[in-house]
Image (cartoon, helix red, strand yellow):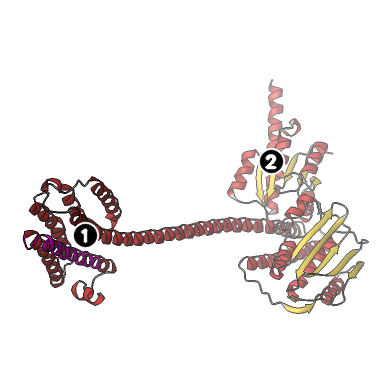
Amino acid sequence: MKDKIKILVIEDTHDLREVIVDILTYEGMQVIEAENGQVGIDKAKEHLPDLILCDIMMPVKDGHQVFHELSHNIDFKHTPFIFLSAKTTAENVREGMILGADDYITKPFQSDLLISSIKSRLKKKADRKESLKQSFKTL
Amino acid sequence: MKTLTYKYCFNASDSGDIKIAKSLILIISICCSFCGLVWSGIYYFFFGFGLTTLLPLIFVVIVISSIFISHFTSNYKILVYGQLVCITWVPGFIQWSLGSIHHSGFVIAWCFLGPIGALLFLNEKEARIWMVMFILILGITSIGVPTFSMDGLKVTENARTIFYLMNIGVPSAVIFSATAYFMKDLIKQKERNFSLLQITNEKNKEIEKSLKREKELGILKTNFVSMVSHEFRTPLATINANSDIILRYSDELSRDDINKRLEKIKSEVLDMTVMLEDILIIGKSDAQKLDFNPVSLDIVSLIKDIIAEYQLSEPKSRTIIFNVSTPIIMIPADKKWIKHIVNNLLSNAIKYSGEDQQIEISIKKEPTGISFSFKDYGVGISKEDIAMLFEPFYRGENVGEISGTGLGLVILQKALNLHKGKIEVESEIGKGSNFRVTLPAV
């Protein structure tokens, strides 16, 4: 059986985290939860998720710090990273994208948008992997 | 004298300064006339009637005529010009008639100074320069006068001294005093200007300060609005996501699951409503619009009633230990706000401590009023968090899943400000917190 896609959800608001986990679970994904930035980094290193969905304003370590730390780790070089934040100004979004995130979703979000964003990032990752495989074969 | 001055010199339209100037010129004219008459008398006494006796009389006639002409033509400057002619030329003629023009240059020089000084005097701005010049020339004149005895038969030393006293001393003394008066006026004017400048500077500083404050308030307002927006977005996201689940996966959801999600939505809406009410209170307090109607009441029984009421609404009862030093303590307070303060402190103590942990409430009479404290043995607050506790939407690092808006203590602080009370917090992580409120008796 093919392994389920692993998504790491880093969100400090319990109720919201719970409902995101439910949505992704209904979509057939395996979800790992983290209640703050530090726990998120630890769990990412432990589970090596396929995609990371991360809030920005959080205790202990915020979303930017999480991204910074993980993007310097070779294991997460190609892991799609999506910010999910209540910081919604154009500057906030630009800041997140300049950091190098793959997407920036603002709260409150539509579940469709969240799912399609996650799926398209995963597809892109899979396509990239496939093209690399092809390149190796050609070589 | 005053009537005379008014009759001969002043016009109804003259300004205060012009009236003073005219008066001074009149005084100088009268002094000079007096000098002329005395001078004529002295000459007559020593030498009999002659040109030297007649000239001072001509001098007097010119001065008096100038007074009358200036009155009829309503031009006080004629008086000044009359003065100029008399003081400048008459002593010159006297000197010349005495046959000693050779040594009288300094006298003529002075004779110019008097009326020129008077003219300058009319131009107030030049008064200071005139003063300096006059003093210098007068000094040089006094020191540099050689003995007046060229022919040895005309003027005695005494007559010469009298001549100087009358023609230089008296008018110069008058002009000097008048200038001093104007200088005083100028200084006063300058002082007024300076104080006006100071007032203007202070006002400017005040305006700058209020502009700065306004700017800061604007920034605070913007920050607050963005904070509010942020705080509303997360529960909205939860509501939205739960409704999406119900709509999207209704086939896979059990009845209980749907109900659970609907309950969650309802609870989030309720939390948002509470938060909205709290924000409205903060908004009102910032605009100084909070209702505050203190009446004298027994704070001990009020706190006990509020706590009893709160406990009735709570599903699980908690052990509350009361420690009251005096059965009745009367203080002026607003019942509505005291209820807010007590409810907030009690709900925090309950929320942030274990179900089996007791809460201690003590009420004490203080020399200046009363104090009451709520002590719990719960999660506690770190020092860093205590410093930020009264900032809107701030919540401690260790609150975990415990719900809250981060506005309760902000409103509590506002309620205390209305009562001129204060709050102190003692806490240690893992050991609990003690919130002590002090309210003044007056």
For the C terminus of chain A, the quadrant is top right
Q: Can residue B117 be seen in this view?
A: yes
Depicted B307 relative to depicted B237: above or below: below
- Marks 1 and 2 sit apart, C-alpha to C-alpha, by 112 Å
Please report the residue visible at 66 percent of the width from the left and 40 percent of the height from the top: A101
**Element type where label 1 sits in the image:** helix
Q: Residue type at mark 2?
A: Arg
Q: Residue B221, how many percent across, how many down?
A: 60, 59
Disc number placed over residue B166 in the picture, else none: 1
Q: Which residue lies furthest to the bottom in this view?
A: B296
Parent chain of label 2: A
**Element type where label 2 sits in the image:** helix
Please report the residue visible at 46 percent of the width from the left and 61 percent of the height from the top: B199
Q: As rendered, which of A102 and B441 lies closer to the eye? A: B441
* Residues rendered magenta in the picture: B21-50
Q: Residue B100, how many percent across, how many down?
A: 11, 49
On whether residue A98 falls in the magenta region, the answer is no
Q: As rendered, which of B84 and B363 lies closer to the eye? A: B84
Q: Residues within 10 Å of mark 2 (few under 14, many from 20)?
A: some
Is residue B427 toward the left or the right of residue B27 in the image? right
Q: Mark 2 points at which residue?
A: A121
Q: Which of marks 1 and 2 is in front?
A: 1
Quarter of the figure with residue A14: bottom right
